[in-house]
Amino acid sequence: MTKKHRIYTMSFAGVYPHYVEKAEKKGRTKEEVDEIIRWLTGYSQEQLEAIIENKTNFETFFAEAPKLNPSRELIKGVICGVRIEEIEDPLMKEVRYMDKLIDELAKGKAMEKILRG
């Protein structure tokens, strides 16, 4: 049995403030972070807030996502030194898609481009 990566058992609520902080440091907003997460996962704002409140872990967060956006497969590039297209673990790929989108937000990319519009 392979050991689960630490991020899978981490609470989404534990990482979420870091996403918001990263965005806000660059003049972006919590609302934009939430919009990205909703776009990626299909969660409503209410569902997202419940996930944060319930301290849902990343594995459950992605497993229970109402509708993972098919356009997320257009997300390419390197995050944390790893090329997204080369990640084989499906759950890790989802986590890195989200990291990459938040990264693009913090780098000042237009929302339309971030959301692969």
Image (cartoon, rainbow, N blue to C red):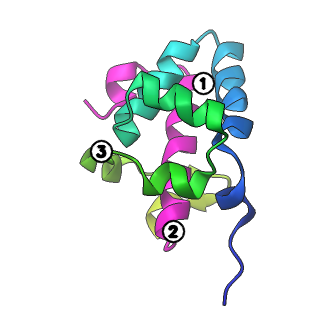
Asked if one can make out residue 77 in the rendered structure from this viewpoint, the answer is: no
Label 1: few (<14), some or many (≥20) within 10 Å? Answer: many
From mark 1 to mark 3, how far is it between C-alphas? Answer: 21 Å
- The reply to whether dot 2 and dot 3 touch (C-beta < 8 Å) is no
Label 2: few (<14), some or many (≥20) within 10 Å? Answer: few
Assign the C terminus to one quadrant of the image.
top left
Answer above or below: position of 55 versus 5: above
User: Mark 1: which amino acid?
Assistant: Ala
Q: Residue at x 40, y 31 (%)?
A: 38
Nearer-N-terminus badge (1/3) = 3
User: Which region of the structure is painted magenta?
Assistant: 88-117
The numbered disc on residue 106 is 1
**Front residue of this view, candidates 98 and 80:** 98
Answer above or below: position of 84 versus 46: below
**Front residue of this view, candidates 100 and 1:** 1
Which residue, given by chain and number where applicable, does mark 3 sit on? 69
Label 3: few (<14), some or many (≥20) within 10 Å? Answer: some
On the picture, is 84 further left or further right than 68? right
Residue 104 percent across, percent down from the top left: 52, 31
On the picture, is 74 further left or further right than 17? left
Question: Farthest bottom residue?
Answer: 1
User: Mark 3: which amino acid?
Assistant: Asn
The numbered disc on residue 87 is 2
Nearer-N-terminus badge (1/2) = 2
On the picture, is 28 further left or further right than 47? right
Which is closer to the viewer, label 1 or label 3?
3
Q: Residue at x 58, y 12 (%)?
A: 28
Element on which disc 2 rests = loop
**Does the magenta portion include 96?**
yes
Element on which disc 3 rests = loop
Where is residue 45, by image quadrant? top left
The numbered disc on residue 63 is none
